[in-house]
Amino acid sequence: MNAFSYARPRALADALRMLRTGAASALAGGTDLLGLMKDGLARPDALVDLTGIEGLRGWSHARGKGLRIGALTPLVELETDETLAKTMPILRDSLRDAATLQLRTMGTVGGNLLQRNRCWYFRDEGTVCWLKGGTRCFAVDGENRYHAIIGARECAMVSPSDLVPALIAYDAEISLTGSRGERRMKLADLFVAPHGSQRREHTLRPAELIVEVRVPEAALARKGTYLKAMDRKAWSFALVSVAAAARIDRGVARDVRIVMGGVAPVPWRVLAAEKGLEGSALDDAACTDAAERILSGATPLRDNGYKVTLARELVRRALRSLVS
Amino acid sequence: MLRGPGAIDLGLTVNGEAVRVHVPPRRTLLDTLRQSLGLTGSKRVCDEGTCGACTVIVDDRPVYACMTLAIACEGKHVETIEGLTKDASGEGERGLHPVQRAFIDADAFQCGFCTPGQIMSIVALLRATPSPTEDDVRRAVAGNLCRCGAYPNIVAAGVNAGRRKK
Amino acid sequence: MPRVVKSREEFEGEVYESLVLVEGSDLPQLDGAEHTQIAHARRRIDGTQRVSGHARYTQDIYLPGMLFVRVLRSPYPRARVRRIDTKKAEALPGVRGVLHRFNAPKAAFRGEDTIFREEVRFVGDEVAAIAADDEDTAAEALRLVEVDYELLPHVVDLEEAIGDMAPPLETDGNVAESATHKRGDVRKAIRDADAVIDATYRTSTQLHNSLETHGAVATWDGERLTVYESTQHVFGVRQGLRTALGLPFSKIRVICDYMGGGFGSKGGVGKYSIVASLFAMRLGRPIRCILTRDEENLAAGNRSATLQQLRLAGKDGRITAIEHTSWANAGQGKWVANPTGPTNTIYDVPNLTSKSYKVITNAGALSAFRAPGYVEGTFALESAVDELAIKMGVDPLALRRKHAGSPKDPMGGKRYSDKHLLECYRIGAKEIGWERRRSGGLRGSALYRRRGIGMATQIWGGGGGPPAYATVHVNPDGTAVVTAGTQDIGTGTRTVLAQVCADELGVDLADVDVRIGDTETPYGPISAGSITLASVGPAVRIAARDAKEQLLGAAAGVLETPKAELRLEAGMIVSKGARTRLGEILGKVDNNTVIGKGGRHPNDPDLSQRTFGAHFAEVEVDVRTGEISVEHVVAVHDIGRIVNPLTARSQVEGGVLQAVGFALTEERFLDRATGRVMNGNLENYKVPTVRDVPAKITVKFVDRPDRRANNLGVKGLGEPPIIPTAGAIANAVANATGARVRHAPLTRARVLEALAVAGARA
């Protein structure tokens, strides 16, 4: 790591002020940032440790007002809390096989949403790929078994988070704060497939922080399933993951959400497929059909065609499990 | 207040003792333990949060010391493998922690390089779950790689240590 | 009087004839009576050190004034280093020294005269090294070194390197024959066959990923060089340093107390050891040069990727011919393992042709990796045997039985010192429930899951041999110290040597300590090739006997009793009912340390010492997702006498686990265009986690002493358990699903592809 200075402010305003000066980076769990720094991909002059800030840790659920999760909440707290496991079981389901216990202990919700992608060309300091300001994506003609099968533009990386598809399937929103004030957005809108001048996975502004994630009350009535395929039985980023959720009303599905990780540069949804299941009993044929629709636009690379097969089956299974 | 980037004085609590070190902010907790404090039981294997050999307990939770800055540990309680052995001069294995004894009995290590990390993960598990199942132990050490493949015995040691503590 | 004798030893699939020094005569085979230590489960004697964090590994050595070295490595797979400018790096505060090809002294290493080549030949090849006050400073300094590279055409992929379009990396091309064997008439047998299978198998590059990376800490006192190194062979490192630095043996000491895994890759001196030594001698300060994980996976060895073609012919329910051709990616290695080794020897098949080729590429050199060649070759051979059995409509185990019973090595005709392979089959079949196996597989535990059973055979060396020496010092308090120049790479060497000593000497295990891993002890061989116990153990036994004879002699004098009437038991001198503590006797003798010496005697040159075994696997396959779950592995091995059933079982479980990695998840990815390793880390190079362990592992031993092998009747166990698992798993997957995956690891992509092929055929 390069040399840097360090501060651990207690007030959010102080943190924002420090982040505005020079090349400072915000540090929370550090599980992604320190990795980027060790690989020479991030070389900040200063780290502003956010973990001393009061009020951004923990979650609350006021009936009728939805679920609020502070951005500095360690992932392990979402995974292990028994009350939360009843309020929104998909959180535990999505986190159980995410990374490792140590990383979930260190990592925070905000950091998880903002983690950078795991593409091995991106992570290799010696490869100047398009996302890092180069001219091309090396994965397209290179080693691409872990890369995108759908939705990629100039960059074939995939959205790595396990938590994000689960949150989006429950219509999560985020609150941000920065030099231009506070704003709220749908979590899904935080992510964009890098293209043109957008050489980053997120639309976060400079010196802006996520402070909270909110899940609307209506979404908490949904049933949800999270399925993840890995290439070993633990401690792997998803080859393909699927978060499926729906309100099951008298045997038929309402407000269906199907969000995939590991297949596209953003958490992948096909709204038409979701709408097509509105009012469906989610029988095998309907689920298979939805899976086909979601993957119909897939354009796999040399070594990742298997992800299409895998994704279809996981979507089908996830949907079926909502009614079983 | 910004500190660094040069070496600064830090106050840490390690294995129950207040210690002072003089390191730059970029120094990880792992390198600080190993180089500044001579606590070389925590191992450096990947140095990027993927293997678990540097697992230590900070405020009762298992973390990777290689992905933790020493400066971020001010005011926190850090426990290392060395802290488990209350009386290292004790004869034979008298000073060992029940998890350490369980590891020896179950032959839960071969080269031993991942062992301190495995043990710290299980010690942290037992604080929250005093009588873990095999699956509890597997989940607790899924982030602790063992290249020799001592896993079956590590799982047995974890379960046995739980039984023994009761 | 020492004398020179000829010996014949097998090591890692090759047979060597050598001249060795021996003294006296060997002890007779350990008798069949109940022993106090041997054949008893014993906890490791160094357990306390290892679980307490006090065991000191090379990585744990921090010396006052020590400097940290980081190595600049080529970012290109092939280039000429034209110019190196280190001015900016040297100006960085804290930088103390720089070495590169324009300022480093000549240092011979693996047939070259420098460690910094003019033409760098793989991504990771050493270009320069920087010593600084701390590691971060050394790393920052590397970024300031300016190197002018002239890029040259390269090839990294095995199959591309074989092809016509590849740039020739050596004047005589990229492909060289490395081993060949022929017996009978393969062509005729194939012509006359009822069934022939012809298939191509591939295995990917496997990385050792020993948890302790390669590295050394060197100190120089103006006269003597001391190197702490994580190594499987302290004497090998010493020899390498002598060759590189021109120092006499007497001025070099190499120490490896504890080491964090090697798996074959730590067999001798490394460039890091030479760099550390050169800096130590130049700067007069302790130098630490320890590789990072990335460097480990670029420049510290690997198991070669292979391409293997097998043709098998069958007639009347027997295998009549085998033709096996293998190409292995040696990278920049100077040798290559032989995947056809098992083919040549496992089965008594009359007609056989095998050829093994070494292929050089612009990738890091291979190094031995736990049963090099045999793991790759057994996967291919045993898959092919099953394919032939299926084609012939016979039971795959029954087919193997017909060829596995010969008491002679079908390759050289020598008699095996001992062999119980059919017994391994019998035990394994019973434990797995082979009778449940159905052609077409079984129903799995859930919808879309299929279950199958498969097996594969293991052959390997592990007989050990000379030279190996040991001493046993018995102290005035009756405790004993075994000293031998061997290493404990995680197998439990310290513990089994202590057991052998305690057993022979007649003292408690707790009273024996073991000092190893130091060139200032009696010579010991490399801890590789599964030879350690079979080489060093018999020497320890002789040393313990020598010490015991001296002790009894001393006791006879003190007790004024004829020596013949005395015994040594549990630390007591026993004579006609009277028991006297050993310490009491020794306290009365002026010469208060009794030193016994022992050396390994040669093997019987007319015999072939081999280990045998068989693994049986039961798997479930999710046919919609390609996920394989290994439900049960039964591992049966015939390795002679079992000294410590507890650590032996651990060794087998560990071998199975590493094999599960080879079979299912482990694979290095090289970018062909840039030659860069994409997954030289523990995130994307997938070693098995605790949750990848088969649901059940059953370990069984034939456990009969090999009375013709050595005075303990032991053979090695380090490598046998990694050899047959992948073949057994692949055969179980094929049994479950009808899908034959001919490329290890059997990833989801490959399984789904094979399922699609099988589905289309069905």
Image: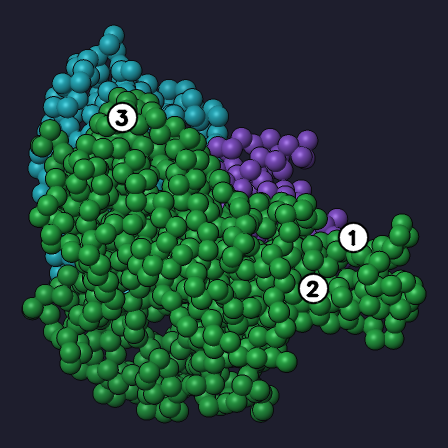
Chain colours: A cyan, B purple, C green
Residue pointed to by mark 3: C438
Amino acid carrying mark 3 in the image: Arg
Amino acid carrying mark 2 in the image: Ala
Residue pointed to by mark 2: C544
Q: Is residue C678 shown to the viewer in this render?
A: no
Amino acid carrying mark 1 in the image: Ala
**Measured Cα–Cα span from mark 3 to mark 1:** 54 Å
Q: Which quarter of the image is occupied by the N terminus of chain C?
A: bottom right
Q: Say which of C498 and A147 sits in front.
A: C498
**Measured Cα–Cα span from mark 3 to mark 2:** 54 Å
Residue pointed to by mark 1: C570
Provide the secondary structure element on which disc 1 rests: loop
Residue C396: x and y in percent read 27, 36
Residue at screen point 35% across, 80% down:
C110
Q: Is residue A275 left or right of residue B6?
A: left
Q: Which mark is residue A99?
A: none
